């Protein structure tokens, strides 16, 4: 087992994280949800020049990255404004998140809006799907990473399970930057203090990884989950990323799509972790050529890297 906690993070890994996320999102989106959602995506899932559109997962990650580039740290008010300004129904936001963002846009303070749909806040995976940005940016600063996860999620996702899902994905991304071995990353993930709801799926994922078990997509969906909640999707994304981390990116995304459910988001989160380990240069060139605004996303990743290097 190789361990190199001093592996310096590279621009290639920043680009790999963001493009991996966007690719997973865009490739997973046509398989998300039931027949109605899939039919809708067949109508709106391509740009005018035939590129594969990405969804809210990528949009919110880009907004978060832009805020970090501008401010160097998380400022909740700024993130809230950026999320609200970027909202467009055709990006396929979660129903609760869409209401929250429209209310913020109309002037409601985010501290009120984030509990205005669900009193306890949303436990959806919307906070986790953008957490790879936090993970790559704060990959050497565990305490700041913790604070940043909380701050970046709570603006739209105040529920403890949503915040813990964001912590899981951010930490997994940060660990993926420094370590290449799945079992090693998994054992560090197990040391995170997460809500008890994450214990069973993470323990099973670790058991599968350590035992070399290769579950089918259906078994993963059944045992770990493939839903829209943070608990039913973030352990799945971590497992899938680590299961495929030394295999082709496209095989991983196909596996997620076969498992069904919240395919864009699970593929986005696992795509980001895969990209953090392997970098942009390992991603499939043909798929990137088909991705909406790939160069813009790469530029954002490069600016985020430069901001990180500047301190
Ligand atoms: C469509 C009861 C709750 C809840 C609570 C349920 C996009 C609701 C992306 C809610 C991602 C849904 C996904 C999702 C991101 C959440 N009590 N039910 N406290 N909290 N729910 O709306 O940003 O795909 O049914 O906040 O987390 O690709 O509508 O959205 O897959 O979970 O949406 O939560 O979703 P939301 P989100
Ligand atoms: Mg989405
Ligand atoms: Mg989704």
Image (cartoon, helix red, strand yellow):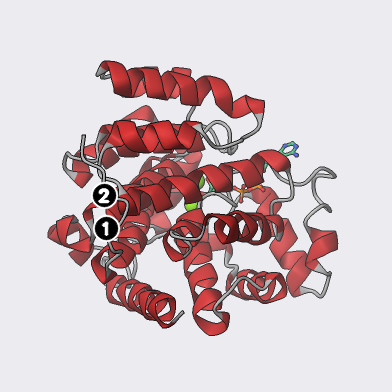
Report whether 102 appears left or right of 28.
right
In the displayed structure image, the side of residue 247 where residue 66 appears, left or right: right
> Is mark 2 in CB contact (under 8 Å) with mark 1?
yes
Name the residue rendered at 30%, 73% in the picture: 298
Residue 226 seen in the current view: yes
Within 8 Å: ligand 2 and the Cβ of disc 1? Answer: no
The residue wearing badge 1 is 7
- The mark tally for this picture is 2
Q: Quadrant of residue 89?
A: bottom right
Q: CA distance from mark 2 to mark 1?
A: 5 Å
> In the image, residue 228 lies at what x, y percent?
56, 38
Residue 215 visible at all: no
**Front-most of residues 11 and 229:** 11
- 41 w.r.t. 109: above or below: above
Q: Which residue is mark 2?
A: 4
Q: Residues within 10 Å of mark 2 (few under 14, many from 20)?
A: few
Location of residue 13 with respect to 269 vertically, above or below? below
Q: Is 44 in front, or is 184?
A: 184
The residue at the point 73 percent across, 73 percent down is 105
Residue located 50% across and 51% down the image? 129
């Amino acid at each position: 087992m190789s361990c190199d906690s001093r592996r310096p993070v590279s621009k290639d890994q920043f680009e790999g994280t963001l493009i991996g996320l966007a690719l997973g999102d865009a490739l997973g989106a046509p398989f998300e949800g039931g027949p109605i959602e899939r039919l809708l995506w067949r109508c709106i899932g391509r740009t005018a020049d035939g590129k594969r559109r990405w969804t809210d997962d990528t949009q919110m990650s880009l907004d978060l990255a832009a805020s970090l580039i501008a401010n160097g740290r998380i400022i909740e008010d700024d993130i809230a404004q950026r999320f609200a300004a970027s909202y467009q129904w055709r990006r396929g936001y979660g129903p609760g998140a869409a209401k929250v963002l429209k209310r913020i846009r109309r002037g409601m303070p985010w501290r009120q809006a984030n509990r205005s749909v669900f009193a306890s806040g949303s436990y959806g995976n919307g906070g986790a799907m953008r957490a790879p940005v936090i993970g790559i940016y704060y990959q050497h600063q565990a305490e700041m990473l913790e604070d940043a996860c909380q701050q970046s999620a709570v603006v739209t996702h105040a529920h403890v399970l949503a915040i813990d899902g964001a912590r899981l994905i951010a930490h997994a991304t940060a660990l993926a930057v420094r370590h290449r071995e799945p079992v090693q990353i998994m054992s560090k993930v197990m040391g995170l203090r997460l809500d008890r709801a994450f214990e069973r799926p993470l323990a099973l994922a670790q058991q599968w990884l350590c035992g070399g078990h290769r579950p089918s997509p259906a078994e993963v969906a059944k045992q770990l989950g493939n839903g829209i909640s943070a608990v039913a999707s973030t352990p799945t994304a971590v497992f899938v990323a680590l299961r495929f981390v030394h295999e082709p990116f496209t095989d991983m995304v196909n596996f997620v799509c076969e498992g069904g459910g919240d395919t864009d988001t699970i593929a986005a989160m696992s795509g980001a972790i895969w990209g953090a380990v392997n970098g942009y240069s390992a991603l499939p060139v043909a798929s990137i050529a088909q991705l909406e605004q790939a160069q813009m996303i790469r530029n954002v990743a490069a600016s985020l890297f430069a901001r990180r290097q500047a301190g």
